[in-house]
């Protein structure tokens, strides 16, 4: 049996699923693949704890570790006696890496991997891009994943068709910086142009969703798709990070507060039912009370619904780690305040669904996901991965579902 333990982003989730399939195809058994994350010190701490716990609970299992944290600090992980094998980030999606561990010849390509253990389990993630050419002052990820590289459009279409044949009705396009898609390819196709070609190549695709988008880099083709393509879900998750211009400048982000306001207004004018999520860092170095209030107010002004908030975490080797740090208690307090706003915003979204009909993608444990990324508890039987009609009747026990 191959088990995966994943930390971090949706891209890591996608990569873990692919590694699990590669390891199984290579004939590995009784192994655990730990896919680490380096976004925060907390994620790295949790990965270390998990590795030690896994070895205690599964002393006979081979512990295989990869991911950004292991790539950035390989000596640290190589010194952990619980780890049997380290795999470089650049090699973790190569079937030969797992064939080498099993002693088998590497005969499978990524496109020929066996289907996952649970076909049609929910949604399928397709990695269209990796790496990043930007150098945000808080981020260590470019050092773990390298420069931006894009997957050619025909390969994306081929992977999409394969996943649809396996029973997936929703595809999520993911990467480190998907808004930079295509700049390294011949003819430099934009993200929007690639998506338009993809949807033309796979007309039977029911749902397409995007992972985090840089607010500074939505291209014209993508704007048009937001306006007129119903298969593109009305849900955009923005890599916002902050809502104060000075903080954004010190983060070395490429958008301003006004850019985000204009983006949200434009998207709602094109598609009035659209909802937004956002990644936000609370307590960035030098962030004053007034700067934080600008971020809080921007979240409110833009009507953001799904917030992913985390306190700033200094990463050794980044410029922000050398800046005057905000006190830890303030980081926590500000993060809690933003999370409380996010819970209220999500509740308002759920309350607006009561009495309405919507389509949901059936997930595990009787949960369904709407086009707007709301999670509903379903009554009755439905196959996991199926898209069904649902009538929203209420919020159970005052709990956001």
Image: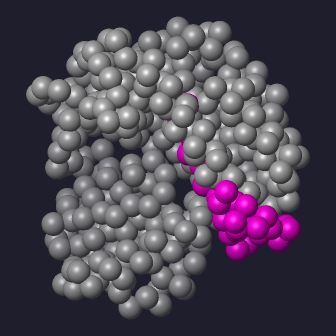
The residue sitting at 55% across, 68% down in the picture is 42
Residue 115 percent across, percent down from the top left? 20, 45
Name the side, left or right, on which 168 lies relative to 88: left
Task: From this view, report whether residue 9 is shown above or below residue 50.
Answer: above
Task: From this view, report whether residue 346 is shown above or below residue 287.
Answer: above
Residue 213 appears anywhere in the view: no
Q: Give the range drawn in magenta.
A: 305-333
Residue 267 percent across, percent down from the top left? 64, 17
Residue 327 appears anywhere in the view: yes
Q: Check residue 329 for magenta coloring.
A: yes
From the viewer's side, name the closer residue of 234 and 73: 234
The residue sitting at 78% across, 47% down in the picture is 292
Residue 368 percent across, percent down from the top left? 28, 30
Task: From this view, report whether residue 272 is shown above or below residue 186.
Answer: above
Task: From this view, report whether residue 366 is shown above or below residue 226.
Answer: below
Q: Residue furthest front?
A: 397
Question: Disc count in the image?
Answer: 0
Name the side, left or right, on which 241 lies relative to 44: right
Quadrant position of residue 167: top left
The residue sitting at 44% across, 61% down in the picture is 7
């Amino acid at each position: 049996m191959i088990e995966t333990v994943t930390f971090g982003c949706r891209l890591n989730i996608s990569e873990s699923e692919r590694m699990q399939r590669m390891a199984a195809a290579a004939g590995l058994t009784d192994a655990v693949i730990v896919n680490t994350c380096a976004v925060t010190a907390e994620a790295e701490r949790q990965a270390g704890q998990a590795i030690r716990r896994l070895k205690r609970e599964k002393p006979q299992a081979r512990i295989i570790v990869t991911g950004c944290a292991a790539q950035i600090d390989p000596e640290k992980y190589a010194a952990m006696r619980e780890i049997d094998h380290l795999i470089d980030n650049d090699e973790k999606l190569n079937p030969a890496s797992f064939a080498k561990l099993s002693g088998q010849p590497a005969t499978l390509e990524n496109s020929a991997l066996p289907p996952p253990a649970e076909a049609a389990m929910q949604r399928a993630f397709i990695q269209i891009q990796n790496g990043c050419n930007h150098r945000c002052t808080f981020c260590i990820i470019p050092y773990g994943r390298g420069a931006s590289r894009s997957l050619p459009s025909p390969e994306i279409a081929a992977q999409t068709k394969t996943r649809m044949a396996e029973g997936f009705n929703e595809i999520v396009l993911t990467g480190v910086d998907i808004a930079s898609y295509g700049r390294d390819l011949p003819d430099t196709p934009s993200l929007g142009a690639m998506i338009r070609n993809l949807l033309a190549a796979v007309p039977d695709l029911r749902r397409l969703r995007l992972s985090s988008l840089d607010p500074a880099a939505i291209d014209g083709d993508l704007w048009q798709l937001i306006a007129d393509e119903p298969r593109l879900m009305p849900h955009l998750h923005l890599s916002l990070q902050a809502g104060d211009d000075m903080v954004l400048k010190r983060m070395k982000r490429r958008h301003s507060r006004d850019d985000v306001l204009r983006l949200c207004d434009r998207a709602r004018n094109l598609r009035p039912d659209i909802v937004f999520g956002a990644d936000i860092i609370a307590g960035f170095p030098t962030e004053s009370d007034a700067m934080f209030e600008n971020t809080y107010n921007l979240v409110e002004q833009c009507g953001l619904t799904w917030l992913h908030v985390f306190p700033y975490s200094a990463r050794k080797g980044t410029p922000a780690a050398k800046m005057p740090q905000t006190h830890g208690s303030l980081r926590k307090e500000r993060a809690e305040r933003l999370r409380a706003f996010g819970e209220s915003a999500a509740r308002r979204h759920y309350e607006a669904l009561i009495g309405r009909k919507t389509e949901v993608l059936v997930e595990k444990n009787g949960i369904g996901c709407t086009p707007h990324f709301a999670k509903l508890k379903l009554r009755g039987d439905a196959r996991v991965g199926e898209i069904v009609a649902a009538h929203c009747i209420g919020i159970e026990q005052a709990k956001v579902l």
